[in-house]
Image: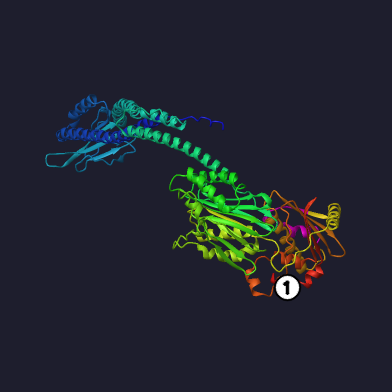
Amino acid sequence: MAPAPKRSVLSIRWIVAGAAAVLTTLVVLGVTGVMEHRTRTVLIDEIESRLLVEARSLALASSRALLTDYPELMLAPLVKEMHQGQPELAFISVVDRSGIVQGHPDVRQIGTAFLPPKNLRAVVSSVPRGGNESLTESGAMLLVSVPILDPNGRVLGTAYVGVRRSHVDQAVSRVSRQQYLILAAFLSAGVAVSFLLMSVLLRPIGALRAGMERVGRGDFSTPVRLKDRTEFGLLADAINEMSSELKAAQGEMVERARLSKEMELAREIQRSLLPSKQTVAGEFVLDGEQWPATEVGGDYFDVLPLPGGRIGVTVADVSGKGLAGCLVTSMLFSLLRAYHATHSSPAALLTALDERLCQILKRGSFVTMFYGVLEPASGRFVYSSAGHNPALVYRAGRGTTEWLRSKGIPLGSIRGGAVGRSLEDAAIHLAPGDALIQFTDGINETVAPGNQEQFGFGRMEEIVRKEAPSGARELLTRLHRAVEGWRDSGAPDDDETVLVVSREGIPAGASAAPAPSREDIAQVLRRFAEAERRGVSLCLPADLGSMGRIGEWLEQAGILRGVPGTAAGLLNLALYEACANIAEHGCGEDPTYTIEIFWMRGAGTTGSFLIRDQGKAYRPEGWRPKDLGDPEVRKHGRGLGLEIIHRAMSRVEYFPGTGLGNITLLEWNPDVAQAREKELRHA
């Protein structure tokens, strides 16, 4: 994977320092703004107070002059001196009560009628004023008027004093400039100190980032060296601790991966020790399955060819499970392969295995084992059990079950030959339709999560009586599903193994159809060659999920054209059952196998279907008609696939193991199917 492109990164040190500087500036500016407004207000109030004082002083000085006959002689020099001493004053005037100017800097105005400045408006001020005193302003000046009183309080006139507005603004600006200069000095110092302080305080972030980058690259050995007593120091310690834990976890992960790989290899090896597919010997089908509780288990089963066409079967359970149990089963596999053809009876073989295992197994370890020898031609089965579960036998003739119990002692449990002395051979005969089921205790001892009740032998008997007629594979599947359902969502506590020896030939009372002759085989091969040239075909993978395509093919190929709806449904069902039987029993539902269906039209809507497969050769000719009116048959509800095929088709023949593979011939006549429609409704 290409490395991700590096993106530009802003240093948190500069971001925080800049933010602190901005905040400091905003605070200082805010405080300065408030202070400047307050200073301006105070300064203006001060100027207004001073102006009032000047006006009051002028009014006081003018009261004596207005009582004389020539007031202008006293007021003219007073006003002129006042104007010269305070050039910022824009207006000075003394007016008598008749409105005649008696004092003015411009002597030409003396004796004229007083004209107040234009555009004056009252000023709202916090400066305290006396009665009849006023404070007004215009765009050019600030004007104060104060009444002139005689000693008796009578009004003699009015004194006017005004200051230029520019003088006020200059005074305020001068103060503001001073404040801003001070502000700039303090602000510069504050920003510099903020940058310096934040840079120093946040300097450890660089070391922390470098440490985290090393951790991200997988370097867990280089610690973050940071001597800091703040939270950064604690964070550095946390990073170092995390690095140590990650290093330890990495080592554990590598070790777990190694162990997982080894366990996977052990599981594959153990699976390779077990039969990969069912064994067919004459009328017998031998099939087994193992479901380990962990990746590998301590259960073992095997099917071994013996001289003279005999078949050896064994089921064993090693004490303990997991890798230790797997190792013992591997040893057992090797020993059994070495001894199975050199001993005359099952008991002798088990005795030899016990002698060897006593030399290998430590005390306290043992193996329970069932071993039997099947003679497919006669159906005779000789067996011996070393402390293993009793075998369950289904008798098809009576529809009952029986248990084969033994007094043998587990292999390796007792030294000194006691196990060999406890072993003995026993023999039974398996008739057509019978089945022998051997298993490990993981099956019967599976407990329900609610009440801890075991699955038990009784439930096994019920399932075997119900499912054994359907064949070995179906019995294995149904038994496993029942155990899983009993366990519900709980995990298995022990390995689960089942081996079925089923005589799936012709049941008692049924007559075997003769094997096809050479002429019959040659004829069907000629018909098949003609179907390949002229017929319509469909190729399916041998899994049940693909069987739904048969109905679509019948429609698209025009095979159902002119066929009544009920007959068309029966045809689809019969072909489905025929191909499903081949997929399940002949191909083991392996989708790498294929099933080919060819259609050759005959007269009208009749015709022939030829089905070819390359799976296991079998001839389900042991079928005999069932009484569909029997409630027990309907209650069972299974094993009716052949019933449907035979009753829907006018002819059914099987040609296993031809030069082109297994061929099934089905001749179709919709009139025959409609005539049997009523009885087929039961199926």
Does 418 appear above or below 1? below
Which quadrant, please, contains the C terminus? bottom right
Residue sitting nearer the eye, 465 or 599: 465
Residue 324: percent from left, percent from top: 48, 44
Residue sitting nearer the eye, 586 or 8: 586
* Number of dots carrying numbers: 1
Res 300 seen here: no
Residue 455 part of the magenta-drawn span: no
Please name the residue that numbered disc 1 is placed on: 679
Residue 610: percent from left, percent from top: 80, 57
- Identify which residue is drawn at 50% across, 63% down: 456
- Using the rendered view, name the quadrant where residue 266 is placed: top right
Q: Is residue 624 left or right of residue 472?
A: right
Residue 544 part of the magenta-drawn span: yes
Looking at this view, name the residue that lies furthest to the right.
Answer: 603
Res 315 seen here: yes
Residue 277: percent from left, percent from top: 64, 50
Does 27 appear above or below 338? above
Give the magenta-colored segment's residue range: 538-559
Which quadrant, please, contains the N terminus? top right
Disc 1 residue type (three-letter): Glu
- Using the rendered view, name the quadrant where residue 246 is placed: top left
- SS at mark 1 in the image: helix
